[in-house]
DNA sequence: GTGCAACTTGAAGCCGACTTCAAGTCAAGC
DNA sequence: GCTTGACTTGAAGTCGGCTTCAAGTTGCAC
């Protein structure tokens, strides 16, 4: 919890504070999402601002961005200081738009399910579920994400993740 | 488009009608999601009801379920006929609950982003984004899904993918 | 100056949901 | 009966986002 020297964080400290594993941080570095200086012995030392970058990346993921997309978005923000209101609001509003789209999509799906309850559905060719935008939208496997914090203990047990 | 004989579909026909690749259908079969009879020569033939099962699985995925979870859910519905209103409504309402949770999560995130716009945020330790449930919730990578139709090239006002 | 936790590296592994491949077989229209 | 496209198989590959591993090195408290 206490900083060792200066304001530099070891990878372990950054991991603890960001909630990410050290392996993930090294991975982020490899992808160019964060950057570290090195000690004489070769160990990583992070500036406190890295904490912000990491938080930004995590938030980006929750908005549905890939790490690559997060990297692109990071490029539009200042490196070593907090972004200004103006700088941030551009990013934030575009993310909010994404979120709105995602919500709209979920609402549509929910409504379809409701319709199906009403119509005693799943009777082929009549049901909205079947003739959904599947056909249109399925060009490939596609990135199909669904925000879901902890499917956990509830109705949905989720993949063990090893 | 026309059925060859009886009411049985070849894998190609099922693929075309369901919008899935034949490879995906074989994969589903391997997982026990769908089932096929075989011709004398060993080729798969599907009953029309398989179309319903496939549609069900796709819908399950959109709700955020894994194929394994979809398989479990399928087990609660009749094999070869359309489910009754009662049978279906149980599934549908539980899915709607999931969707509601997902929507709620997105709303929370959106609100946080809005707060950040207001506060000129990302200034560490003050920002909601940082002290989000990240710490608490991050036991691992977790299944993190975000419903998003086309991450790239869409209407979405988001960063250039490359 | 030593002991030990925390760090270093690259390579390999894992997960889910598929796709791709190669080499061979089947079905059906002419 | 032949041709041709649709089908068969198992194994391996892909993708994103990491984790795990093994074997060696650093940093710091005592």
Image: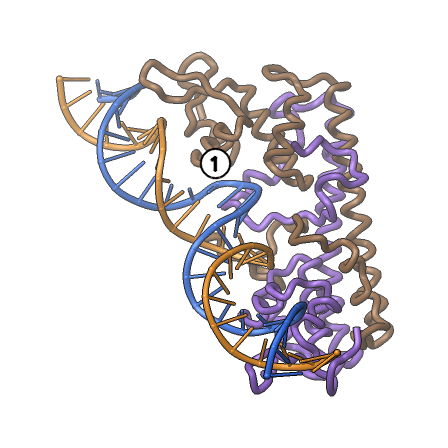
Chain colours: A brown, B purple, C orange, D blue
Q: Nearer the viewer, residue C21 or B56?
A: C21
Left or right? Give the position of B55 relative to B23. right
Q: Which residue is drawn at 73% across and 60% down?
A: B97
Camera-side residue of A47 and B79: B79
- Quadrant in which residue B108 is drawn: top right
Residue displayed at 61% across by 64% down:
B24
Q: Which chain carries label 1?
A: A
Q: Quadrant of the N terminus of chain A?
A: top left
Nearer to me, B9 or B51: B9
Q: Is residue A75 above or below residue B154?
A: above
Q: Residue at x 73, y 67 (%)?
A: B16
Residue at point 66% right, 38% down? A65
* Numbered marks: total: 1
Residue D17, given in percent of the width and then of the height, sits at 54, 41
Q: Is mark 1 on a helix, strand or loop?
A: helix
Q: How crowded is mark 1: few (under 14 residues within 10 Å), some or many (20 or more)?
A: few
Left or right, A50 with respect to B94, comes to: left
Residue B73 appears in which quarter of the rendering? bottom right
Compared to residue B98, the image places residue C27 above or below, namely below
Q: Position of residue B13 (x, y in %)?
A: 71, 72
Disc 1 marks which residue? A24
The picture places residue B56, in percent across and down from the top left corner, at 71, 69
Question: Which quadrant of the structure image shows residue B61?
Answer: bottom right
Q: Which of A149 and A72 is in front in this view?
A: A72
Image coordinates for residue A97, horizontal then vertical, percent: 80, 37
């Amino acid at each position: 919890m206490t900083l060792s020297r200066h304001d530099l964080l070891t990878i372990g400290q950054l991991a603890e504070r960001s909630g990410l594993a050290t392996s993930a941080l090294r991975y982020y570095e490899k992808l160019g999402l964060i950057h570290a200086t090195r000690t004489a012995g070769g160990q990583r030392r992070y500036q406190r601002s890295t904490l912000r970058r990491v938080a930004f990346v995590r938030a980006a993921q929750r908005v549905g961005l890939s790490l690559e997309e997060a990297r692109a978005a990071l490029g539009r923000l200042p490196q070593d200081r907090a972004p200004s209101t103006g700088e941030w609001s551009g990013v934030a509003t575009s993310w909010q738009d994404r979120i709105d789209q995602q919500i709209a999509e979920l609402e549509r799906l929910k409504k379809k399910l409701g319709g199906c309850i009403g119509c005693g559905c799943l009777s082929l060719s009549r049901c909205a579920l079947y003739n959904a935008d599947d056909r249109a939208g399925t060009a490939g496997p596609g990135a199909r994400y669904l925000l879901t914090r902890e499917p956990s203990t509830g109705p949905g047990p989720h993949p063990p993740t090893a």
